[in-house]
């Protein structure tokens, strides 16, 4: 649970990073139509949520800093409306929002056009992240046009427009103690869900039934939604990296790859495990699995302050390349194969990514031109894989095998904490769980 004081402190830190005589506009997400008059489940914009903790659609946060550095946080949100609330659900209302969210001022959304004009007029710099919400972009460009068009009225548009996102994203990259506690819990719930799916799997069950087992576990443990579309790929489907059809029945002798994590209080977990449908790895599956696991373990060793994702990936690729040569899948000198990135034919994605409010979370991967070193408080995934589809140039016994192993690591002072360590991962652990 993130206390309101943390959201207040985040706004203060962001405002401190703004220039004087500036205004920042951060819109909430809007509801999206699924079909006719039904909407997709609403998900708040991550930047907006990070700065407010407010979950309603259509709101707008405005941060202003005058010439002397005096700051003000303003929120526009939906008005209380008895009829709308009877039909569609409760609203906080702007009066309640002011005290509950500890804002300096709040307005009803119906006042947005007039009041936003007052807040932006005369400021030298506008901080805004264009390109996410087209309708809101139009509103901002219209506002600037109005301000530019009437100097005699005392209107003056900002001369400079800066992207607000790099400032917010740099903050989001480093997790607070409260965020880490939530992510630990998200990792734990997700890990338990993967165990449940392993225990449920058997020939004849469907991929979507495994998905249902997992989502049921999330909901029964306080996480109503998955953080992204759950991937359950059995057999050859496991070689499709972001397979979400999840429509086939599991076949005896196949592997099944599950990539799923819950979203808890906005924060994502992201776990992949690959295991045999019948609880017993074949020889060929075992060889590839051990190789991917060795690559993951080697990469884990690079996750510590000062390490980089690029270095961890080099280490993982070295293990994969050597292993593929040993198995007769690649031929040639390992150094030359590494130089040519030959293993990329079977390992098509990156080693990992930042994790937080978004599954592919925000934050720069380079600082200036250099690879960004890990620092305590960052959370990332490490997820090597090998995928041999029907067209892969490999011995027949490996065709149709897709394996990814993914965990979520928090960088600590001395190395890392694995937030998703609870799911069985060695072949012995997996077979033991599935056969008991
Ligand atoms: N679940 C998407 C990914 O692993 O990046
Ligand atoms: Mn991932
Ligand atoms: Mn994943």
Image: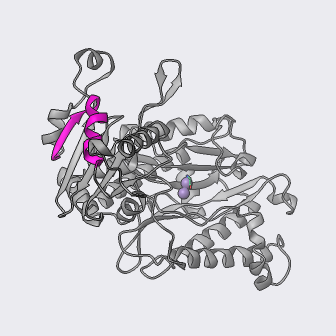
* Apparent side of residue 427 relative to residue 394 in the rendered image (left or right): left
Q: Main secondary structure of the magenta part?
A: helix
Q: Does the magenta stretch include residue 114?
A: yes
Left-right relation of 165 to 117: right
Q: Which of 114 and 356 is in front in this view?
A: 114
* Residue 93 position within the rendered picture, expressed as x and y whole percent measured from the top left: 21, 30
61 relative to 375 in the view: left or right: left
53, above or below 419, in the image: above
Residue 342 sits inside the magenta stretch: no
Q: x, y (%) of residue 175?
A: 33, 63
Task: Give the residue drawn at x 35%, y 44%.
Answer: 147
Task: Work out whether 223 lies above or below 388.
Answer: above
Residue occupying image coordinates x 67% and y 58%: 403
Q: Can residue 262 be seen in this view?
A: yes
Residue 126 x %, y % = 36, 54
Is residue 432 visible in this depiction of the protein?
A: no
Q: Residue furthest left?
A: 99
Q: Which percent across, then down, holds residue 115?
A: 25, 38
Magenta residues span 102-121
């Amino acid at each position: 649970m993130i206390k309101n004081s943390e959201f207040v402190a985040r706004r203060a830190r962001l405002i401190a990073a703004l220039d004087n005589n500036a205004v920042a506009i951060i819109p909430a997400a809007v509801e999206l139509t699924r079909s006719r008059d039904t909407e997709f489940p609403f998900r708040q914009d991550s930047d907006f949520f990070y700065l407010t903790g407010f979950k309603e659609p259509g709101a707008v946060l405005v941060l202003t800093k005058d010439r002397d550095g005096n700051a003000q946080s303003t929120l526009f949100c939906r008005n209380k409306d008895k009829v709308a609330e009877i039909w569609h659900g409760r609203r906080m209302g702007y009066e309640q929002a002011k005290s509950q969210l500890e804002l300096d001022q709040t307005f009803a959304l119906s006042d947005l056009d007039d009041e936003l004009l007052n807040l932006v007029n005369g400021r030298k710099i506008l901080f805004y992240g264009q390109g996410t919400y087209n309708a809101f972009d139009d509103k901002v460009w219209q506002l600037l046009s109005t301000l530019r068009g009437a100097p005699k009225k005392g209107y003056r548009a900002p001369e400079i427009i800066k992207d607000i996102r790099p400032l917010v994203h740099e903050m989001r990259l480093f997790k607070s103690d409260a965020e880490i506690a939530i992510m630990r819990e998200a990792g734990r719930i997700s890990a338990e869900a993967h165990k449940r799916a392993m225990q449920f799997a058997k020939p004849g069950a469907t991929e979507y039934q495994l998905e249902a087992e997992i989502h049921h576990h999330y909901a029964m443990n306080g996480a109503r939604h998955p953080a992204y579309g759950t991937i359950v790929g059995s057999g050859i489907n496991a070689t499709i990296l972001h397979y979400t059809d999840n429509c086939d029945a599991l076949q005896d002798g196949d592997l099944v790859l599950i990539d799923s994590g819950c979203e808890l209080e906005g924060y994502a977990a992201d776990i992949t495990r690959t295991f045999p449908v019948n609880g017993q790895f074949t020889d060929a599956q075992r060889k590839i699995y051990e190789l991917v696991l060795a690559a993951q373990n080697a990469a884990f060793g690079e996750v510590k302050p000062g390490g980089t994702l690029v270095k961890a990936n080099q280490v993982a690729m070295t293990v994969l390349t050597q292993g593929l040569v040993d198995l007769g899948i690649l031929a040639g000198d390992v150094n030359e194969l590494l130089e040519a990135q030959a293993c990329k034919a079977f390992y098509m994605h990156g080693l990992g990514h930042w994790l937080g409010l978004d599954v592919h979370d925000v934050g720069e991967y380079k600082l200036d031109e250099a690879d960004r070193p890990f620092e305590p408080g960052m959370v990332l995934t490490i997820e090597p894989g090998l995928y041999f589809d029907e067209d892969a140039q490999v011995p027949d016994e490996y065709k149709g095998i897709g394996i990814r192993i993914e965990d979520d690591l928090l960088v600590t002072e001395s190395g890392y904490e694995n937030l998703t360590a609870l799911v069985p991962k060695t072949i012995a652990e997996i077979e033991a769980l599935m056969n008991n």
